[in-house]
Image (tube, helix red, strand yellow):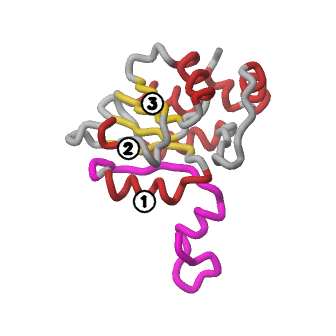
Amino acid sequence: MDMGELTRPSVVAEILERHGIRLSRSLGQHFLVDANVLHRILEGAELGPGDTVLEIGPGIGTLTEELCDRAGRVVAVELDPRLKSVLDGLLGKRPNLVTVLGDAMRVDLSGLLSPWEEVKVVSNLPYSVATPLLLRIMRELPQVRLLVVTVQRELADRYLAAPGDPSYGAV
């Protein structure tokens, strides 16, 4: 399968249906199906062969494939065993990809990454854990040099709001 097809909603729906997967709203599951957004994420990440990337919630691998094409090493943490199985089936032979089954809020992220390597977090974050996960990453992974993530618009508005702005508040 041409991985570029994974930005087409009909292709994603067919893959999910074939594997009997229904997305869980409670887990904040959603897929990146906009090629323009995908390319903006990749541009912002400025990846090269010396980069190590941490991706949280890779799903079926739309972003993951592109990360593997550009970075030296990609560590992808997926909570859903069904999605990890699909991801491994599509990308499992990539020598620079490590897929981990686990909850990114509980797995030992620092144990997945060398303490001396600089890391870029590039991810289409699960909506349900975006804020606590970002706080955890900033607190526990000092080797992270860049975060390029997608979050819900309302959350992004809160992150970027200035005091006095209607969107301003605790995140």
For marks 2 and 3 on the same chain, the one whose residue lies earlier in the sequence: 3
The reply, left or right, for residue 115 in relation to residue 139 is: left
> Quick one: label 2, few (<14), some, or many (20+) residues within 10 Å?
many
Instruction: Tell me, for residue 135, which label it has, or none.
Output: 1
Q: Please, what secondary structure does the residue beneath circle 1 have?
A: helix
Toward which corner of the image does residue 84 lie, by quadrant?
Answer: top right
Instruction: Name the residue tied to disc 3.
Output: 100
Q: Amino acid type of disc 3?
A: Val
First to last magenta residue range: 142-171
Q: Is residue 43 above or below residue 72?
A: below
The reply, left or right, for residue 68 in relation to residue 170 is: left
Q: Which residue is more in the foreground, 80 or 137?
A: 80
Q: What residue appears at the point 49 percent right and 41 percent down from the top-left corner? A: 103
- Distance from Cα at disc 2 to Cα at disc 3: 17 Å
Residue 147 lies in the magenta-colored region: yes
Q: Amino acid type of disc 1?
A: Leu
The reply, left or right, for residue 114 in relation to residue 126 is: left
Q: Which residue is more in the foreground, 27 or 125?
A: 27
> Quick one: label 1, few (<14), some, or many (20+) residues within 10 Å?
few
Of badges 2 and 1, the one in the foreground is 1
Q: Amino acid type of disc 2?
A: Lys
Residue 33 lies in the magenta-colored region: no
Relative image position of residue 29 (x, y in whole percent)? 65, 43
- Distance from Cα at disc 1 to Cα at disc 3: 21 Å
Relative image position of residue 157 (x, y in whole percent)? 60, 67
Instruction: Name the residue tied to disc 2.
Output: 120
Q: What residue appears at the point 57 percent right and 16 percent down from the top-left corner? A: 89
Relative image position of residue 58 (x, y in whole percent)? 55, 35
> Which quarter of the image is occupied by the N terminus?
top right
For marks 1 and 3 on the same chain, the one whose residue lies earlier in the sequence: 3
